[in-house]
Image (cartoon, rainbow, N blue to C red):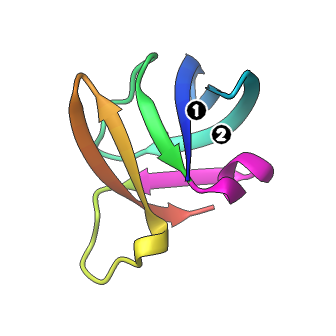
Amino acid sequence: MKKVVIDKIDGYNYTLKCNNKEYIRNIEFYDTKINVGDIIYLPDDVLEEENLYAYGPIKEGAKEEDIIKVISNDKEIYLERYYG
Protein backbone atom coordinates (compact mmCIF):
# COMPACT_ATOMS: atom_id res chain seq x y z
CA MET A 1 0.00 0.00 0.00
CA LYS A 2 1.14 3.47 -0.82
CA LYS A 3 0.06 6.64 0.91
CA VAL A 4 -1.22 9.18 -1.64
CA VAL A 5 -2.70 12.63 -1.16
CA ILE A 6 -5.50 13.89 -3.37
CA ASP A 7 -4.18 17.01 -5.05
CA LYS A 8 -7.00 17.71 -7.52
CA ILE A 9 -10.39 16.28 -8.50
CA ASP A 10 -11.87 16.73 -11.98
CA GLY A 11 -14.99 14.60 -12.30
CA TYR A 12 -13.75 11.04 -11.81
CA ASN A 13 -10.14 11.97 -12.54
CA TYR A 14 -8.12 12.20 -9.34
CA THR A 15 -4.65 13.71 -9.30
CA LEU A 16 -2.74 11.84 -6.62
CA LYS A 17 0.66 12.72 -5.18
CA CYS A 18 3.07 10.24 -3.66
CA ASN A 19 6.81 10.75 -3.01
CA ASN A 20 7.04 13.75 -5.38
CA LYS A 21 5.33 11.75 -8.16
CA GLU A 22 1.96 12.61 -9.64
CA TYR A 23 -0.61 10.09 -10.84
CA ILE A 24 -3.93 10.74 -12.54
CA ARG A 25 -6.39 7.90 -12.03
CA ASN A 26 -10.03 7.50 -12.95
CA ILE A 27 -11.78 6.47 -9.73
CA GLU A 28 -15.42 6.35 -8.75
CA PHE A 29 -16.33 6.33 -5.06
CA TYR A 30 -19.76 5.05 -4.02
CA ASP A 31 -21.51 6.41 -0.92
CA THR A 32 -18.39 8.29 0.22
CA LYS A 33 -17.41 11.92 -0.29
CA ILE A 34 -13.71 12.25 -1.11
CA ASN A 35 -12.07 15.69 -0.97
CA VAL A 36 -8.85 17.40 -2.02
CA GLY A 37 -6.32 16.89 0.76
CA ASP A 38 -7.68 13.50 1.81
CA ILE A 39 -5.18 10.68 2.19
CA ILE A 40 -5.74 7.29 0.57
CA TYR A 41 -3.73 4.13 1.08
CA LEU A 42 -3.84 2.37 -2.31
CA PRO A 43 -2.34 -0.90 -3.54
CA ASP A 44 0.72 -0.51 -5.76
CA ASP A 45 -1.11 -1.89 -8.81
CA VAL A 46 -3.56 1.04 -8.79
CA LEU A 47 -0.67 3.46 -9.19
CA GLU A 48 1.12 1.30 -11.77
CA GLU A 49 -1.81 0.61 -14.11
CA GLU A 50 -4.16 3.07 -15.73
CA ASN A 51 -7.66 1.67 -15.43
CA LEU A 52 -11.12 2.60 -14.23
CA TYR A 53 -11.43 1.87 -10.51
CA ALA A 54 -14.49 1.83 -8.26
CA TYR A 55 -14.60 1.72 -4.46
CA GLY A 56 -17.49 1.65 -2.05
CA PRO A 57 -18.72 0.34 1.28
CA ILE A 58 -17.35 -3.02 2.34
CA LYS A 59 -19.68 -5.92 1.59
CA GLU A 60 -19.79 -9.23 3.37
CA GLY A 61 -17.09 -11.59 2.14
CA ALA A 62 -14.70 -8.83 0.98
CA LYS A 63 -11.11 -9.90 0.44
CA GLU A 64 -8.48 -8.14 2.54
CA GLU A 65 -6.43 -7.25 -0.56
CA ASP A 66 -9.43 -5.32 -1.95
CA ILE A 67 -9.74 -3.02 1.09
CA ILE A 68 -8.32 0.51 1.09
CA LYS A 69 -8.15 3.12 3.81
CA VAL A 70 -9.14 6.77 3.36
CA ILE A 71 -8.37 9.46 5.92
CA SER A 72 -10.77 12.38 5.59
CA ASN A 73 -11.24 15.05 8.25
CA ASP A 74 -9.29 12.89 10.73
CA LYS A 75 -11.74 9.99 10.18
CA GLU A 76 -10.61 6.60 8.89
CA ILE A 77 -12.90 5.13 6.24
CA TYR A 78 -12.43 1.64 4.83
CA LEU A 79 -13.67 0.88 1.32
CA GLU A 80 -13.74 -2.19 -0.90
CA ARG A 81 -12.58 -2.29 -4.51
CA TYR A 82 -15.56 -3.24 -6.68
CA TYR A 83 -13.70 -3.30 -9.99
CA GLY A 84 -10.55 -2.10 -11.67
Residue 29 x/y as whole percent: 43, 43
* Cα distance between the residues tagged 2 and 1: 5 Å
Residue 82 belongs to the span the image colors magenta: no
Residue 50 belongs to the span the image colors magenta: yes
Q: Residue furthest front?
A: 19
Residue 45 image label: none
Q: Residue furthest left?
A: 75
Give the residue pinned by disc 1: 12
* Residue span colored magenta: 43-55
Give the secondary structure at mark 2: strand
Given the image, on which type of amino acid does mark 1 rest? Tyr
Give the residue pinned by disc 2: 26
Looking at the image, which residue is at 35% across and 77% down? 62
Q: Residues within 10 Å of mark 1 (few under 14, many from 20)?
A: some
Given the image, on which type of amino acid does mark 2 rest? Asn
Mark 2 or 1, nearer chain start = 1
Residue 82 x/y as whole percent: 48, 65
Residue 49 x/y as whole percent: 79, 53
Q: Quadrant of the C terminus?
A: bottom right
Q: Quadrant of the N terminus?
A: bottom right
Compared to residue 8, the image places residue 77 above or below, namely below
